[in-house]
Image: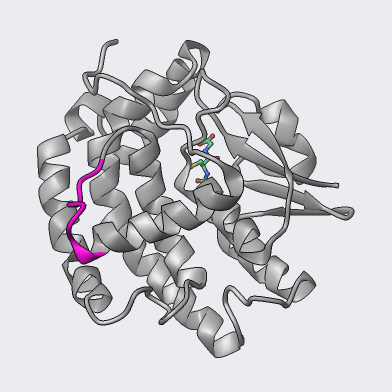
């Protein structure tokens, strides 16, 4: 049995973590089914068996994996059909894309999404979410959240990606691969939280629609939150 422990909101069907989405997309790419195990921020006991505290956690045939990039590598080793990362050189390049996207895409999105995450998580998770994020960010959530500034930074960050996608349908060429899913996971984070800082008629918007449509064709509609983005303490 294959199980994916993935972050959920108060509504257990709302899964929104970018890293968990990467793994959902990767499993869909390989044609592998799994049982979803929705996990709240403070459900640490559920994933204690993995020896660490973050999701995604994948169990597969007696193996326990965590970290989205490590899971991509594992899936390629165990299920070589439809590679995600490919050979060692290609895998290093994907790691570079992952690092670049962390700063160019993930940080701007965080500024947009913090108030939305706050809205959707279980109220019992809020104290943990606030204290862990404020410690990591070095400031209060209210001081960090900046949806308008985040949108500007997001547009700047994705400008090279927009140019790339004007030349080919997917980052990896004519068909999607691991780098597509590394980036699409980040955009799905925003999309599931009801935000879309990209235009439908941009190359990035068309690419995202292709990835989402392919996923929804096999897995059904993706749950999207309808929320007020204001932060209330
Ligand atoms: N590098 C990890 C990052 C995983 C990660 O940060 N997961 C977040 C969800 S987005 C998490 O589990 N947070 C729980 C917590 O902060 O306690 C990956 O790529 O999987």
- Where is residue 52 drawn, in percent x and y? 67, 43
| Residue at x-position 40% and y-position 37% | 192
Q: Is residue 78 left or right of residue 177?
A: right
Q: Quadrant of residue 40?
A: top right
Q: Looking at this view, is 186 or 203 the one in front?
A: 203
Question: Does residue 177 appear left or right of residue 87 in this picture?
Answer: left
Residue 206 x/y as whole percent: 28, 61
Q: Position of residue 107 (x, y in %)?
A: 28, 50
Side of 45 relative to 102 (left or right) = right
- Residue 198 forms part of the magenta stretch: yes
Question: Residue at point 43% right, 67% down?
Answer: 180
Q: What residue is at 41 percent from the left and 82 percent from the top?
A: 173
Queried whether the magenta region covers residue 109, the answer comes back as: no
Q: For the stretch drawn in magenta, what is the main secondary structure? A: loop
- Residue closest to the far front: 217
Above/below status of 173 relative to 29: below
164 to the left or right of 64: left
Judge by depth and name the residue closer to the eye, 31 or 156. 31
Residue at 15% over, 46% down: 151
Coloring basis for residues: one colour
Residue 103, above or below 17: below
Residue 70 in sight in this render: no
**Which of the 4 image quarters holds residue 127?**
top left
What percent of the width, then of the height, locates residue 155?
14, 56
**In what quadrant of the picture does the C terminus appear?**
top left
State the extent of the magenta-drawn residues as a range.
196-203
Asked if residue 154 can be seen in this view, the reply is yes
User: Extreme right residue here?
Assistant: 62
């Amino acid at each position: 049995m294959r199980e994916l422990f993935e972050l959920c909101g108060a509504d257990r069907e709302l899964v929104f973590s970018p890293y968990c989405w990467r793994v959902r997309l990767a499993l869909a790419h390989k044609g592998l089914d799994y049982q979803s195990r929705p996990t709240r921020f403070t459900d640490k006991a559920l994933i204690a068996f993995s020896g660490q505290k973050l999701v995604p956690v994948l169990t597969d045939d007696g193996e326990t994996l965590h970290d989205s990039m490590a899971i991509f590598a594992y899936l390629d080793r165990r299920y070589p059909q439809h590679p995600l990362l490919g050979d060692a050189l290609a895998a290093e390049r994907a790691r570079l894309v992952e690092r670049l996207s962390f700063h160019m895409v993930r940080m701007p999105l965080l500024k947009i999404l913090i108030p939305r995450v706050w809205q959707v998580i279980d109220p019992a998770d809020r104290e943990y979410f606030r204290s862990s994020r404020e410690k990591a960010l070095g400031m209060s959530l209210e001081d960090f959240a900046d949806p308008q500034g985040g949108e500007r930074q997001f547009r700047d960050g994705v400008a090279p990606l927009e140019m790339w996608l004007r030349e080919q349908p997917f980052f990896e060429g004519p068909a999607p691969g691991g780098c597509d899913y590394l980036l699409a996971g980040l955009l799905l984070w925003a999309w599931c939280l009801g935000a879309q800082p990209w235009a439908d008629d941009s190359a990035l918007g068309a690419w995202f629609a292709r990835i989402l449509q392919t996923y929804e064709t096999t897995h059904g509609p993706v749950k999207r939150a309808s929320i007020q983005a204001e932060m209330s303490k």
